[in-house]
Image (cartoon, rainbow, N blue to C red):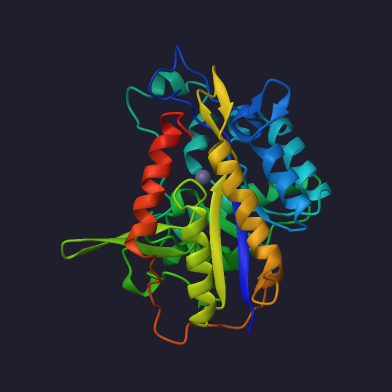
Amino acid sequence: MKTKVFLTIDTEFSIGGAFRAPAALQPIGAQNVLCTVGQRSEGLGTLLHTFAAHGLQATFFVETMQTAYFGDAPMGDIAKQLAAAGHDVQLHLHPVWTYFDHPDWQSRLAQVQPNDDLHGRSVEQLVAWMQRGIDTFARWGLPAPVALRTGNLMVDRNVYRAMAQVGLKVASNIARAVFDPAEAALRFNAGIHHIEGVVELPVLTYADLQLGARTHRKVLTITGSSLAEARCLLDRAHAGGAPSVVLLTHCHEFVKGDMRGALAADKVNQRRLQDICRYLQDNGDRFEVTTMDRMVNSPVQGMPAADPLFSVPPPLAVMRMVQNKLNELNLV
Ligand SMILES: [Zn+2]
């Protein structure tokens, strides 16, 4: 059986410190996604170019709540471009943006703190926010989303109950190393699960180092995982009978520096993406790169063992830490 691989990109604008210093800083819009350096889009442009070069389709989880500040156009243009390039465009929600619904948001900061939580909310509130996202897709002229990734991977059972009510049938809301759900039954490292009638595909959480009695966990990303780690995890997941591997990245992982000022291509991360895509392309006998929209009505495919935690050999983790540090210091 081939292991399904999902390349997922949280495609979002940034508050950019506006809540911290409203008089000085404004949210960052399209540049947070395009990451233009000179004339080149090193963020989204790199992703689209790399996927096209390897004949791969990805799922872009596009954040819609930012329309409260930016209006429909900036992200709408990006979402339409993604759909036109043949990628899967699905929903990503950061409710913190609804703070801009209040015209007096700047003075309001003294009384009420902005809140980005999606867990601990009522089903009614979640349904309203999800419907708002679905309505945004409609205004953009895109097909209704069928999949959701919650902001900050925050999740509880009410999220799935709300999803079921609005027709969001596929989720990738769980990434234990980012946000460990309070409910033990939602703590999945990998696999394909059914929760409240929704198909959940967790972002892969893996172990990299043993720190005394503690196992250090992280999620599979481009910035956080080297090519050697990604290859090792893909190989081990397939050998272990894992039905799926979900990788998470963001457009801004392919640049370094200041989004408002001096910005440069992150050549290490761009190379990692290219090399992972090539590995997946070259190993099509074991891996099927696919998209979230195709998982509607998917049967449950648990793991052969009860939710195993895949790991990388510690030397690979140490080599990645060195590589990332050298990259940070612009020495590679
Ligand atoms: Zn996000």
Residue visible at 78% across and 58% down in the picture: 55
**Residue with the most extreme left position:** 212
Q: Is residue 286 above or below residue 249?
A: below
Q: Position of residue 301 (x, y in %)?
A: 55, 83
Q: On the rendered structure, is 235 left or right of 113?
A: right
Q: Position of residue 178 (x, y in %)?
A: 38, 54
Q: Is residue 83 above or below residue 279?
A: above
Q: Position of residue 302 (x, y in %)?
A: 50, 82
Looking at the rendering, in which quadrant would you find the N terminus? bottom right
- Number of marks in picture: 0
Regarding residue 290, the answer to whether it shows in the image is no
Q: On the rendered structure, is 301 left or right of 206?
A: right
Residue visible at 45% across and 31% down in the picture: 331
Q: Foreground: 141 or 45?
A: 45
Regarding residue 286, the answer to whether it shows in the image is yes
Q: On the rendered structure, is 315 left or right of 90?
A: left
Residue visible at 78% across and 55% down in the picture: 143
Q: Is residue 238 above or below residue 100?
A: below
Q: On the rendered structure, is 274 left or right of 177?
A: right
Q: Foreground: 157 or 11?
A: 11
Q: Is residue 101 above or below residue 194?
A: above
Q: Foreground: 297 or 37?
A: 37
Residue visible at 38% across and 51% down in the picture: 319
When asked about the image quadrant of residue 250, the answer is top right
**Residue with the most extreme bottom position:** 304
